[in-house]
Amino acid sequence: MLMPLRSASITFTIQKLLAKLSARQKLALQGVLIDEFTSPQNYFNYLKKEAHPLTKGLYFAEKGESAHLAVACASIIARAWFLESLTTFGAPYDVVLPSGAGANVDAFAAKLIKKYGPDVLRETAKLHFKNTEKALALARKLK
C-alpha cells in the first residue's frame, strides 16, 4: 500500500524532489525527463511560481511512458497512489471521492460542502480548478 499524503492540496515539484538528493546524486544527475502534459512553454510559465526553478537539463517527451521505462513506472506508481487517495481522503467523510471533472463531480462536492462546510475542499480537492467555484455555487442552491 502506498503512503497517502495528509492533504489533497499538497503538490510535488521537481525542486522538492531535487532537494531530497544528496550532493553526489545531484552531480550524477544527467537530466530530468518530463512527460509532456503541456507544452514546454506552458511548463516554463508554471515555473515562474517557483523560488529556484530547475530550467536546465529538462527533456520533454509526449507519451513518455511509451518510450521510457522509468516514465512508465512512475506513471503506474502515480496512478496507484491517486486511486488509493480517493478512498483515503474520502474516509473521514465515509465516501470514496470521485475522480475527474464534470457535473457528477461538482454535485458530489456540493453535497460534501453542504454537509461539512467549504473547508472540506481543502482536504478533498484541488482548489485551483474551475470545479471549486461550480461546487460552491451548487452547494449554495442545495436545501
Image: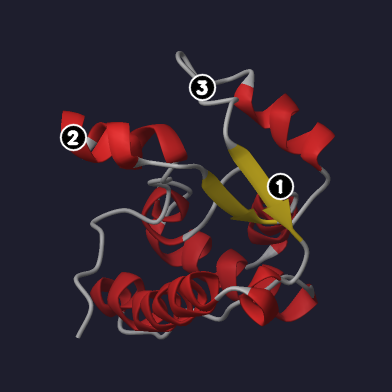
User: Alpha carbon of mark 3 to alpha carbon of mark 1: how far?
Assistant: 30 Å
* In the rendered image, the vertical position of residue 25 relative to residue 84, given as above or below: above
Q: Residue at x 66, y 66 (%)?
A: 142
Taking depth in this image into account, of 141 and 123 the one nearest to the observer is: 123
Q: Upstream in the sequence, badge 3 or badge 1?
A: 3
Residue 137 place in picture, x, y as percent: 73, 52
Residue 15 place in picture, x, y as percent: 40, 32
Residue 102 place in picture, x, y as percent: 78, 73
* In the rendered image, the vertical position of residue 34 relative to residue 14, given as above or below: below
Specify the quadrant that holds the C terminus.
bottom right
Q: Upstream in the sequence, badge 1 or badge 2?
A: 2
As helix, strand or loop, the secondary structure at mark 1 comes to helix
Residue placed under numbered mark 1 in the picture: 133
Residue placed under numbered mark 2 in the picture: 24
Q: Residue at x 43, y 52 (%)?
A: 117
Task: Name the kind of residue labelled 3 in the image.
Answer: Pro
With 132 as the anchor, is 94 left or right in this view?
left
Taking depth in this image into account, of 117 and 31 the one nearest to the observer is: 31
User: Alpha carbon of mark 1 to alpha carbon of mark 2: how far?
Assistant: 46 Å
Quarter occupied by residue 135: bottom right
* In the rendered image, the vertical position of residue 82 relative to residue 138, given as above or below: below
Task: Name the kind of residue labelled 2 in the image.
Answer: Arg
| Callout in the foreground (3, 1) | 3
Task: Name the kind of residue labelled 1 in the image.
Answer: Glu
How are the residues colored?
Answer: secondary structure
With 59 as the anchor, is 112 left or right in this view?
left
Residue placed under numbered mark 3 in the picture: 53
As helix, strand or loop, the secondary structure at mark 3 comes to loop
User: Alpha carbon of mark 3 to alpha carbon of mark 2: how far?
Assistant: 20 Å
Taking depth in this image into account, of 41 and 94 the one nearest to the observer is: 41
Q: Upstream in the sequence, badge 3 or badge 2?
A: 2
